[in-house]
Image: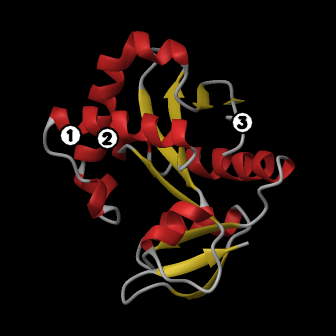
Amino acid sequence: MTQPIFIETEDLLLHSFRAEDMKRFDSLTRDIHQLFGQHSTTTFLPHKKLSHIQQAETLLQTALINQHNGNSQWYFITQKKGQRTIGMIELITPNTARQHYQLDCYPHFIEFCLSSEHMGKGIMGRLLPRLLEKLKQKGIDKIGAVAHPKNHSAVRVLYKSGLIKKASFDSIQHFYYN
């Protein structure tokens, strides 16, 4: 996995898990629980649905281990004011994808979501293209994503980020690739 990327806007930070996040691990756990406890957030990510705070803590611990092992990298979308995490983007390595899927090619995969109160504000449309550009600068130029065709906002963000529909992924999702 490449060195973590940091993106700053006027009101947001896009960052991986940092040492200073250990000081706010409890509030980060609550933010992740709230994010993945929302029906609107997990409608198209049912495998991320959380119902208990302990699940959020386990998810964060697993993400940290996966980051350390080079299997994936979580990027938190955090508001500068109040340090509240309102979304995330996960970058999954080709080797990790290979363990779970049978595909013709294995790019790095992205998965992303925002809390319901921040959807429709253009946040992901501003951040994801910037992240993909920085990844490209670091030599990661093959990026893929999976999205349900009814997840119109995700599909728009993928197109805006330079990913286009290549094929059906499974019976309910499409595969997008740059």
Crowdedness near tag 1: few (<14), some (14–19) or many (≥20) residues, C-alpha within 10 Å? some
Q: Which mark sits nearer the N-terminus, 3 or 1?
A: 3
**Where residue 176 sits: x, y (%)?**
61, 76
Residue under pointer 1: 55
- Amino acid type at image mark 3: Gln
- Marks 1 and 2 close (CB-CB < 8 Å): yes
State the residue at coordinates (57%, 32%): 16
Q: Is residue 127 visible?
A: yes
Crowdedness near tag 2: few (<14), some (14–19) or many (≥20) residues, C-alpha within 10 Å? some
- Amino acid type at image mark 2: Leu
State the residue at coordinates (23%, 55%): 39
Q: In this view, does 169 lie to the left or right of 43?
A: right
Quadrant position of residue 31? top left
Res 3 label: 3
Give the Cα separation between the discs numbered 1 and 2.
Answer: 6 Å
**Where residue 127 sits: x, y (%)?**
65, 44
